[in-house]
Amino acid sequence: MDFKHPVPVTELASTYSLQLRGKDTNLAIGINEIHKVRHGDITFVDVEKYYLKSLNSDATIILINKDITCPPGKTLLITDDPFAVYNQIVWENRPLHYLNSNRGENLQIGEDSQIDFGAYIGHDVTIGKGCYIQSGAYIGDHTIIGDNVSIQAGALIGTDAFYYKKINGKYTKWRSGGKVIIQDNVEIGAGCTINRGVSGDTVIGNGTKLDCQVHIGHGVVVGSNCLIAAQTGIAGKTIIGSGCVIYGQVGIAQNLKIGDNVVILAKSGISKNLLPDKTYFGIPADDARIKMREMASVKMLKKNHE
């Protein structure tokens, strides 16, 4: 998530009563969870086994709960509760902005785009040229929609990430500071749900088509020219390559990478990364030819024992 303006680390330390270690002239340009960090970002860590991962990441500023040696060029901001400070920074930069009509503030709509009566558009939304958004659709705050995009009735885009941190046995919600970006020539079927990212963006690539009732989790990136059939669910931060075809009722776990031109047959469960240019099937999914041979072998074994 980008800030509107760079923020000096000294200002962060003063505002949130943090101890500052390391370079005190750094500027924070944004804030991101560890999976999405870039140079200039703030991230946080509060578990010692992940210290090195955070310190060696691209993040420039690290909220941390221990006074340790700071890597050259970086800044440590020390606090007893890094997550609480992280979440507060996101809240302050993405405050809850209620929608009191069916059109939010700072809405930009391109030429020849049609938005039916009964569609709800949030704040700071950009819609490109030649788009059609049907009645009953919801487009959440900060969503960016390209040209020639079709969004059917009841689609919910830019809803909160399903993302919680367990603290003292209870689940605390992360503030969703990311966006949804829908590129050109995309079609979103009726009843689809697309969560915005926690801090990064959820992206649907050029020319991709979603059937009805597809769920896209927070921070997912779907490549260009993919086909995704009904009742498929893709969990948070998974990356889908370009040219993929995903049949109905497929479940894909979080944090995975699916290669280009992959075909996933119906009712498959994906729990690991998939190589490009192959067809997969089963639970857990594997090369479809291997799975089919396994099924044939099992049937033969059963037949031989009858």
Image (spheres, grey):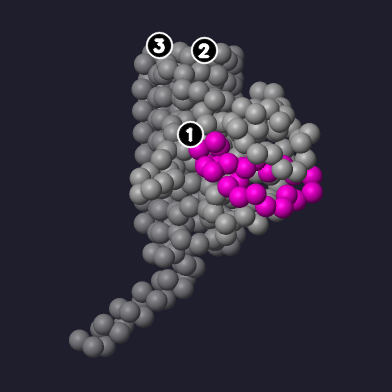
For marks 1 and 3, the one nearer the N-term is 3
Look at the image and tell me in which quarter the C terminus lies: bottom left
Left or right: 171, with 15 as reference point: left
* Magenta stretch contains residue 74: yes
Per the image, the residue denoted by label 3 is 101
Per the image, the residue denoted by label 2 is 105
Q: Amino acid at mark 3?
A: Ser
In the displayed image of the protein, which residue is found farthest to the left?
306
- Quarter occupied by residue 33: top right
Residues tagged 2 and 3 counted as in contact (Cβ below 8 A):
no
Mark count: 3
Residue 278: x percent and y percent? Answer: 55, 62
**What secondary structure is found at the residue carrying circle 3?**
loop
Left or right: 18, with 299 as reference point: right
Quote the CA–CA distance across marks 1 and 3.
23 Å
Per the image, the residue denoted by label 1 is 175
Q: Amino acid at mark 1?
A: Arg
Q: Amino acid at mark 2?
A: Glu
The residue under the point 55% across, 19% down is 124
Question: How would you rate the neighbour count of disc 3 (Cα within 10 Å): few for under 14, some for 14-19, many for 20 or more?
Answer: few
- Give the residues drawn in magenta, as a range: 63-86
**What secondary structure is found at the residue carrying circle 1?**
loop
Foreground of the two, 39 or 269: 39
Question: Relative to residue 113, is residue 51 depicted above or below?
Answer: below
